[in-house]
Image (tube, rainbow, N blue to C red):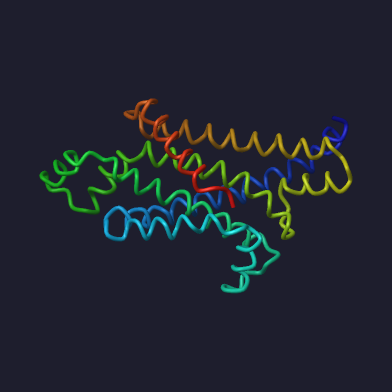
Amino acid sequence: MNWVVNNLDLIAGLALAHLRQSAIAIVAAFVIALPLGWVAWRYTALRGSVLTTIGLLYTIPSLGLFALLWAVFGIPYLSENNLIIALTVYGVAIMTRSVTDGLDSVDAATRDAAIAVGYGPWRRFWTVDLPLAGPVLLAGLRVTATSTIALATVGILIGVENLGYLFTNGLQRRIIPEVLAGVVIVVLIALLFDLMLVLAGRLLMPWASHRDGSRAERRALRRFASEGVA
């Protein structure tokens, strides 16, 4: 406990860096997964191959992905950009299927009614399909956010400072409170981010029942567990 009290500034700085890195990756993953998930939903002949290919990205070991991004795209290996892009790739791998499932959950009769009153594809997507797919998208986003926040700690292995520093430094120096502080703060950040997403969902989707959201979240968690952890 004394170590924690004496190093509050260090913990706060690492926590803010961790939150920033994770938030950028989560938002980027959602933005990229949205059109990819739509393509998989719209073109059913490609759905299986698209979702399988994107899902396989999550099986790439993190250190291997860091090296791949450096070798193929020239992104500096020991850089924060490398970490954020890798986290984004993992987020896209999780989130894309949720986008497809969400769009698939929209009632066909509702979509037909929107077409009947003159809604074009673009307007129908933003005003009908996307809002009604919201509960499933939110469930997938919550899983993506939790996974990203946890995975971000591997950044310390390539010299990117965040809460992962508390793990490696604590183990090297055998300071158990430092390691425990890192674990607790990562969990708290994940819970805080999840709470913010839930509140945002209730604000933006007041029509969505809690039961619908819970079912969607359980499906997303089962799918995430079946795909394994990188």
**Residue visible at 68% across and 63% down in the picture:** 79
Left/right of residue 209 with respect to residue 42 in the rendered view = right
The residue lying furthest to the front in this view is: 226
Question: How many labels sit on residues?
Answer: 0
Q: Nearer the viewer, residue 61 or 70?
A: 61
- Residue visible at 73% across and 57% down in the picture: 157
Quadrant containing the N terminus is top right
Give the image location of residue 172, x and y in percent: 86, 48
Q: Residue at x 37, y 48 (%)?
A: 99
x 36%, y 29%: residue: 212
Between 8 and 191, the residue placed more toward the observer is: 191
Residue 19 in the image: above or below residue 192: below
Q: Is residue 16 above or below residue 196?
A: below
| 192 up-or-down from 117: above or below | above
Q: Which image quarter: residue 205?
A: top left
- Locate residue 37, reporting x and y percent: 36, 53
- Residue extending farthest to the left is 116
